[in-house]
Amino acid sequence: MKSTYSLPDPLGIRKTTVSVFKNSKFVSVDYEKLIIFAKEIKKRIDRKELLDEWQFGKIKKSPQDIFILDTVNFCFWAKEGERKWKVEYPKGNILDGWKALVACFDRVMEDKIPISDCRFLENITIDQTKKLFRSCNRTKIPLLQERFKFLKQSARILRQKLGG
């Protein structure tokens, strides 16, 4: 088997994480399980079952849509004693966490809000961001301000580095 160090690393991921991996005290990798997992992913790719509705929603998304979705994919936990952020979409389907985030993007796309347009995102307001992530239980999505900031930053980077 090839060493991972001899494989191409176009994004520099291995190069930038090798010291963390080598110096980790509390995390280890079970290489046998990793190989089993990789083979399962390969099977799903071959059967075209890897990217499904559960992962990215009912509405087909472009790579840019997925990039923007992943930009705000973090921390859905409620503080102790607080209600969890939940979204109802479509009607009667109440979701939380990752699935709720995906539902927000489906809802926005259905409403024809140009979520993948860099000009729109660079100028998005906090009120528009609140509406984007609105819940069905009056609970704000955790770290709303950070998500707002990341949407704007992503749009700026996409426009400046990749032509929008």
Image (spheres, rainbow, N blue to C red):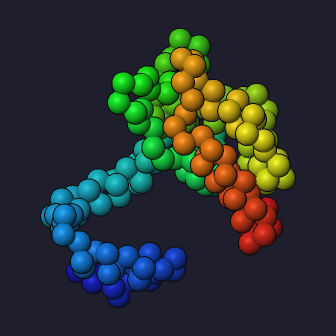
Tell me if 105 is positioned left or right of 11 in this view. right
Asked whether residue 153 appears in the rendered view, the answer is yes
The residue depicted at 59 percent of the width and 13 percent of the height is 91
Q: Nearer the viewer, residue 67 or 129?
A: 129
Q: At which x and y percent is residue 90?
A: 59, 19
Figure quadrant of residue 56? top right
Q: Residue furthest front?
A: 81
Q: Nearer the viewer, residue 104 or 66?
A: 104
Asked whether residue 109 appears in the rendered view, the answer is no
Q: At which x and y percent is residue 81?
A: 36, 24
State how many labels appear: 0
The residue depicted at 74 percent of the width and 43 percent of the height is 115
Tell me if 32 is positioned left or right of 21 in this view. left
Reply above or below: 107 against 76: above
Q: At which x and y percent is residue 93?
A: 51, 17
Reply above or below: 114 against 17: above
Q: Residue furthest top?
A: 92
Q: At which x and y percent is residue 144?
A: 60, 40
Reply above or below: 41 against 80: below
Identify the image quadrant of the N terminus.
bottom left
The residue depicted at 54 percent of the width and 24 percent of the height is 139
Figure quadrant of residue 88? top right
The residue depicted at 52 percent of the width and 47 percent of the height is 73
Tell me if 155 is positioned left or right of 17 in this view. right
Q: Nearer the viewer, residue 80 or 3?
A: 80
